[in-house]
Amino acid sequence: MNRRIQRLVANGIIATVLTPTVLAPGALGLSLIVGPSVAAAETLSEALAQAYANNSMLAAARAELRRTDELVPEALSGWRPQADVTTGGGYVFSGGGSGGASNVTQSSGPAVALDLRVKQPIYNFVTPATVRQAKSAVRAQRARLTAVEQDTLLHTATAYLDVLRAESVLQLTGDQQRQLDRDLQSAQRRFALGELKNSDIAQSEAGVARARAMRTQAEGSLQSARAALSALTGSAPDALTMPVMPDDLPATEAEAADASVNSPNVIAADFALRAAEDGVDVSFGQELPQAYVQADAGASTQSILGLVSFPLYHGGMLDAQVRAAKQLVGQRQREADGQRRQAKQAAITAWALLQSGRANEESYQAQVKATQVAADGIGREGGLGLRTMTDVLLSRQQVLEAQVESLGAQRDALVGAYQLLAAVGRLTANDLNLDVQKYDPTAHYNDVSQLWGGRDIGDDK
């Protein structure tokens, strides 16, 4: 047997069989499989900061909040004076007398009318409710902005991890292809020595073809993952580095479920419900009296009056508006209840993904080590003619599958962690302490809420 081994080594037949079929046992994590980069590394925090600053959907949500801010000065206008000028022109005619047909009406000449009316509300039941409704709408929209921010950061983190996994899978499939290329060369030399049959060569060639197809598929997956990340951050991804598990995660499933009340979707639904309840008061207030002062000034008359208006009947329109507002309250209540259930479900699902990812990662890493040992042994036995080419190819494929599954489990655990942060309302630029200029959702509100006029929106971004 020793002479047989020496002859195989001399002919270069088992040299590649003895080559490790996979990475070293320590190289099981994404961070190690990716390897060192020649360019400056881009961390997950940097990618999240780019998405926060550049994402168009997030910018649109900020603009939507600024638009909603304008509901407050619009509502406050109900306390402010209104001034109108009415003007017109024409001819004034005067009669010529009451005699016969010769007494024709004659025009006294052109006339111009100019009247000024100023109306100052004293009290009504609509404006207070409208102001409350507007402020609730603003707070609901702020929560929706936070939800969009969290979605953007979560999608970015997921895309970032997808790129890392795709890069690692591409490296693994490339290593697999190169290994199988060497195996094919070894098999061809053994075939020339009469050690193998044509069927063995065909099996080896099929393994190489499959490895090439897997590498091509991995290249496509990486390209797709990079495009998804670039669409979120606004720039092409650079060399990426493996992130660590986030801190301050809920310790138990029950804690995660309880913390789901802090989800921005839940908060937005609660304030939308408040706005709907205020809407009932707005509709009902239209049927109540309103007091105001009205001043009129014309060419020949001037007046100033204190007036009280009592709505009596408007064809049933006001009552219909009250009923519709009450129906909206019922709708918003059900939506709020649904958001609470969805947020709780999302928190529990994210918790389960995190835990299963952690457990699977440990299991798959153990599987990688076991299949690696088995593949190395089968490869050596194959070089001695004790194993078929099918056995060798199958063992290598099992190692690759275990490695890919390990990468997927590591990715799933991290994605679950970020999903859990989002479910409890802690996946924001402030919570993550991102190195980026933070958007202040109250700044525009403070600028415009008390404005009495002006149409310039400045350079809000």
Image: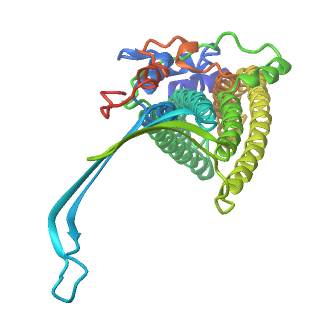
Residue 26 x %, y %: 63, 13
Q: Is residue 134 left or right of residue 361?
A: left
Residue at coordinates 61% horizontally, 38% vertically from top-left? Answer: 126
| Residue 91 drawn above or below residue 97 | above
The answer to which image quadrant residue 18 occupies is top right
Residue sitting nearer the eye, 424 or 176:
424
Residue sitting nearer the eye, 127 or 302:
302
| Residue 328 drawn above or below residue 231 | below
Residue 15 visible in the displayed image: yes
Quarter of the picture holding the C terminus: top left
State the residue lying farthest toward the front.
Answer: 99
Residue sitting nearer the eye, 15 or 171:
171
Quarter of the picture holding the N terminus: top right
Residue 138 x %, y %: 56, 30
Colour scheme employed for the rendering of this structure: rainbow
The answer to which image quadrant residue 345 occupies is top right
Residue 182 x %, y %: 50, 34
Q: Is residue 171 left or right of residue 290?
A: left
Residue 202 x %, y %: 58, 51
